[in-house]
Image (cartoon, helix red, strand yellow):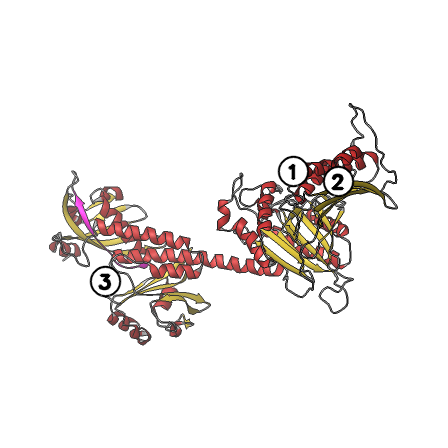
Amino acid sequence: MRTEDVLAAIATGLWRWDNASGIVSLDAEAARLLGLPAEPVRLSEAAVRSRFHPVDWNEIDGVVSLAVAEGTLAEARLRIMDGQGRVIRTVRSRSKPLIEGSDYQLVGTLQEVAEPQPGTAGPHTPITGDWRRSREAFLLDAGRALAEARSTAEVLRVAASLSMPGFSPDGLAVFGMSGERLTVIGHHGQQDGDEGPFTSMSLDTDYPAAEVVRTGRALYLPSPEEYRRRFPTTWPLAEPFERQSWAFVPLVVAGRTMGAWMAAFKHPVTFTPDERSVLTTVARMLAQALARAGVAESERELSLGLQRTMMPVLGPGIPGIQVAARYVPTGGGLQVGGDWYDMIRLPGGTAGGTGGGAGRIALVIGDVQGHDVRAAALMGQLRIALRAYASEGHRPDAVLSRASRFLYGVNDGYDGYDGDGRPGTGAPGGGPRFATCLYLEVDLETGTVDIARAGHPDPAVRMVDGTVLLRPTAGGLPLGIDADTDYPTTRLTLDPGETLMICTDGLLETGGHDLDSGWERVKRLLEAHRGDDLEELADTLVEAVHGPGSHHTTGPLADRREDDIAVLLLSRRPATAVRETPRRTLMTIAQAEPERIAEAREQVRQLLHDWTDEDQLDSAVLMVSEMVTNVLVHTDGDALLTAEVACGDKGRRLRVEVSDASDELPHKRHPGEMASSGRGLVLMEMLADAWGVAPRGEGKTIWFELTEPTGSEGCCA
């Protein structure tokens, strides 16, 4: 008797589905069960699909995919519809995939079954809508939680917290590979140390996880008897945990098995196709999450290594100063960009040594264009070059000139092509790069600071009383643009108890700010700081502009947070407690820079930020403008402005001096009503409490003084 006749006798139809051609072959009984004439027929997939309930067809599609992936039996219940959309019967389908390369055929049977009575349930009960919705909601939540995990530990915590609908495991383990050995990446539901026998297990071991890794196919062990029968060698290792069912599912990424996931149950689980589908889906998401976490952790480890290599250790050991620094990457990619800072002990001194004298150090901060690996590489090269030039004993202007020539040569040797062979565009990733830089040479004994600047933000000084001044400095082009750029030097003095801050533009512009509004924000932070702990101040600056609180102080621009942040703080420690020291500012206005007269006026305003008499403040700004302008108009040299606020017997006193190299003394004149000059000394005579002209050998100094009214809040105690 033919097989078809035997199957027909027990009301069972035979069918074959060719995945490559999309043709389904039915025998007479299978055609009858589908509501077709009882004769053999070959139909398209669409024609067969029209006979099934659409919800059940979607379900069988997932069951078949799972069976093909695992090489197991596909089993499902299907409701058969007539032409009017009415359910005429329910059939059970059992099929086995026959895989040939990337194509496969399904050969299976159809058998009519009775519909279950309401309230009954069993291992082969059709999936209800509520269970399906619950499963879909679970998978959505699981996928979202696993996608948000950023480390292996987070992925394992998420996996341990998953509550699968109807059959949650009470024990989990994630196995990885190290060469030809099985390793335990993490586990849950067992005691610490229980993983010992399973760690560093050979892949040839007769153990379910090892077999899954070898074959890439899932294993389902619904009972202890099944486990003992299939894996007698390692059953004694699993027996003490008193579990009833186990699922070992491969962790596959990009077609490669990277490990196995074990889900163990204290209650029996039959592992229906739907349960296997959930477990397989979770395993796929878990594998992707672990792969992402592994890449992220590797990048973080590389980033930390690069940062440790490229950023100096600013430890103790230099007497008389305190130093603190911070570097904050953008947060994307390798988290290493072009920002850097450095502290260099200079030759010719004994900073930190055993000889006499405090010695000299150099502070450097810079920013190479871009936030990628090439920017980091150029930063490393430039930092080494700067260290070399500084160690040779060059002055700040010479150090930056040589560094600019070095970077220009690197750019000149660049072939002008991006990594993919296209012409370079100058955009991040291609084309020549430039760098901004601020180089400071500090004499630790006198507090003298010589500064050379290459297109970088100016330094700032926080005085003992909390007043903060931005110190305008002369500067040149960013490094690498012109091989023969000059970098003029500016000198200032850092008094004991004062703090110098230098930073990259990321500290100022982060949070939707431009340089001006960003500086005002940083200035408020510096002024509000109490105490002399520079580490705390550095944390405050970074947290305020880059931490959670910074979102409440965004500026008028888009808050992109795309730039790295580097900040370096240096404070001179006074030998004794500093009760009150004068506020002082000093700047040079060159003949070729008349626009810096506005900076001189702003410096005086910042110096007198808490001066109580507004009329005196306006008078001081006016006299400074007149004095500096007079030097630039009537002499051939530069103007040196010095302003100081000090406490006297009658209150605070402002003294301003403007020096030049001309020996010609100014003369008081009586300008006519329409005259455009000649009012400088007249104004000083009218507005200043005291003024004068003092010859200085080669040149002269014009000065004036103002005394704050007695009894004002700003007066000295």
From mark 2 to mark 3, how far is it between C-alphas?
99 Å
* Residue position for label 2: 689
CA neighbours of label 2 inside 10 A, class few (<14), some (14 to 19), many (20+)? few
Q: Which residues are magenta?
A: 70-81
**Residue 528, how many percent across, how many down?**
57, 50
Estimate the x, y position of residue 555 in percent, counting from the top left. Answer: 53, 41
Magenta span contains residue 34? no
On the picture, is 636 further left or further right than 306? Answer: right
Give the residue pinned by disc 1: 614
Q: Which mark is residue 270?
A: 3
The amino acid pointed to by label 3 is Thr
Q: Relative to the observer, which residue lies in front, 554 or 248?
A: 554
Which residue is at the front of the view, 24 or 577? Answer: 577
* Relative horizontal placement of residue 641, taking residue 578 as reference (left or right): right
**The quadrant where residue 287 appears:** bottom left
Residue 609 rendering spot, x and y as whole percentages: 64, 43
Asked whether disc 2 touches disc 3, contact meaning CB atoms under 8 Å apart, the reply is: no
Query: In terms of sequence position, does the residue under pointer 1 or pointer 2 come before the other?
Result: 1
Task: Please report contact status of discs 1 and 2: CB closer than 8 Å, yes or no.
Answer: no
Label 3 or label 1, whichever comes before in sequence order = 3
Mark 2: which secondary structure? loop
Relative to 394, residue 624 above or below: above
Identify the element where label 1 is drawn: helix
